[in-house]
Amino acid sequence: MTERAQPSPMRFYATLMIGVGFIAIGIMLFIFLQESASASADLSVIPLEVDFPAPLLNLKNLAGDSVSIQQYAEKIVLVNLWATWCPPCKDEMPALQSYYQKHKEEGFVLIAIDQEEPLDAVQPFVSEFRLTFPVWLDQDGQAQRKFNTISMPSSFVIDRSGQVRLTWVGGVSEEFLERYVTKLIKE
């Protein structure tokens, strides 16, 4: 039988210190990520400043009436393209509703344009989320084509002169809307 060599105490303590160091780094990284996530739920959503004329859209509202973005000239209009089956669309609806309620008296309107779903799929969703802003139906994807997007949710902010000034893809929080859209309302 051969004798097993015992590890030196120095080697043991060095290995122990390296292990403790990795654990400390892991804890600090976890704390940093938790603070970052709670500070902003919108880390992946970044608005893009743009400047192009709002497209002409003629769609139907939930009552079946013809509607158009041009009806809201002189207002700040947030157009949100969404669908009932889209998880981030569902997640952002309470924030959109709350923001709309706070700012509708300031010349702000939010138009939620459902993409290619029938009224009987959209109406229960509107009721469930108690949406009070205009909801339109886009049966043939006209809005996606005219705004040149395939992502949902996609949002576009139109200023009082009819120019699209901001756009983003992804669900947002009320804090995000306050940070970026309120500036345009106050102009």
Image: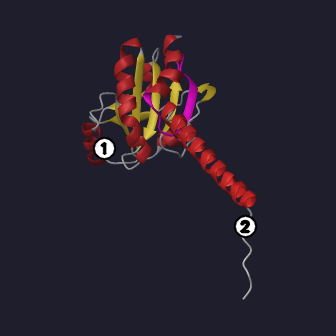
Residue 7 tag number: 2
| Quadrant position of the N terminus in the picture | bottom right
Write the residue at 24% across / 38% down: 127
> What scheme was used to colour the molecule?
secondary structure
Three-letter residue code for mark 2: Pro
What is the crowding at mark 1: few (fewer than 14 residues within 10 Å), some, or many (at least 20)?
Answer: many
- Viewer-side residue, 121 vs 15: 15
Residue 95 placement: quadrant: top left
Q: How far across and how far down the image is residue 32, in percent? A: 57, 38
Can you identify the residue that label 1 sits on?
122
Residue 71 seen in this snapshot: yes
Magenta span includes 69: no
Alpha carbon distance from label 1 to label 2 = 69 Å
Query: Closer to the observer: label 1 or label 2?
Result: 2
**What is the secondary structure assignment of the residue under circle 1?**
helix
What residue range appears in magenta? 159-174
Three-letter residue code for mark 1: Val
Give the left or right position of residue 92, taking residue 130 as reference.
Answer: right
Residue 138 placement: quadrant: top left
State which tag comes first along the sequence, 1 or 2.
2
Write the residue at 68% across / 51% down: 17
- Viewer-side residue, 148 vs 86: 86
- Viewer-side residue, 56 vs 31: 31
- Viewer-side residue, 53 vs 131: 131
Give the left or right position of residue 104, taking residue 3 as reference.
Answer: left
Q: Residue furthest bottom?
A: 1
What is the crowding at mark 2: few (fewer than 14 residues within 10 Å), some, or many (at least 20)?
Answer: few
